[in-house]
């Protein structure tokens, strides 16, 4: 058995969920925004690598996951 390291970078144009027009109800789209996406992966065992960066109009966060094979 050996350990495999997975690496991913999540990107989104916003940190928080997007607002919907005149409603401005962020709770309607809980899956959008970098924070929501990264939080989901952390619950699945992924670990943050560094901090949030910003480039080309998007927020970016790197994460890693160790798995036994």
Image (cartoon, rainbow, N blue to C red):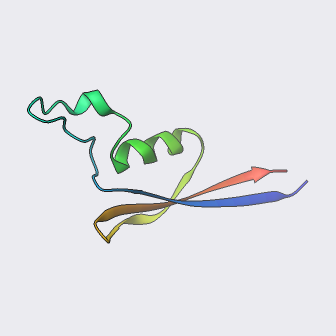
- The answer to whether 36 is drawn above or below residue 29 in the figure is below
Relative to 48, does residue 25 appear above or below in the rendering? Answer: above
Give the number of marks: 0
Which residue is located at x 44 percent, y 48 percent?
38
**Residue placed farthest to the front in the image?**
21
Identify the residue at image location x=55%, y=54%. 47
What's the residue at 28%, 66% (across, down)?
57
Task: Name the one closer to the observer, 10 or 23.
Answer: 23
Where is residue 49 drawn, in percent x and y? 51, 63
Describe residue 1's horizontal placement relative to residue 46 as left or right: right
In the picture as drawn, the residue positioned furthest to the left comes out as 22
Judged left or right of residue 45, residue 32 is left
The structure residue drawn at horizontal position 34% and vertical position 33%, both measured from the top left corner, is 30
Q: Which quadrant would residue 8 be assigned to in this image?
A: bottom right
The percent coordinates of residue 59 (x first, y second) are: 33, 61
Tell me where residue 56 appears, x and y as whole percent: 31, 71
Q: Residue furthest right?
A: 1
Lateral position of residue 21 relative to residue 67, left or right: left
């Amino acid at each position: 058995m050996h350990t495999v390291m997975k690496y991913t970078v999540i990107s989104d144009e916003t940190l928080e969920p997007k607002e919907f027009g005149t409603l401005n109800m962020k709770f309607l789209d809980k899956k959008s925004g970098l924070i929501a996406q990264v939080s989901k992966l952390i619950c699945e065992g992924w670990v943050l690598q560094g901090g949030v960066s910003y480039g080309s109009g998007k927020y970016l966060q790197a994460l890693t996951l160790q798995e036994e094979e």
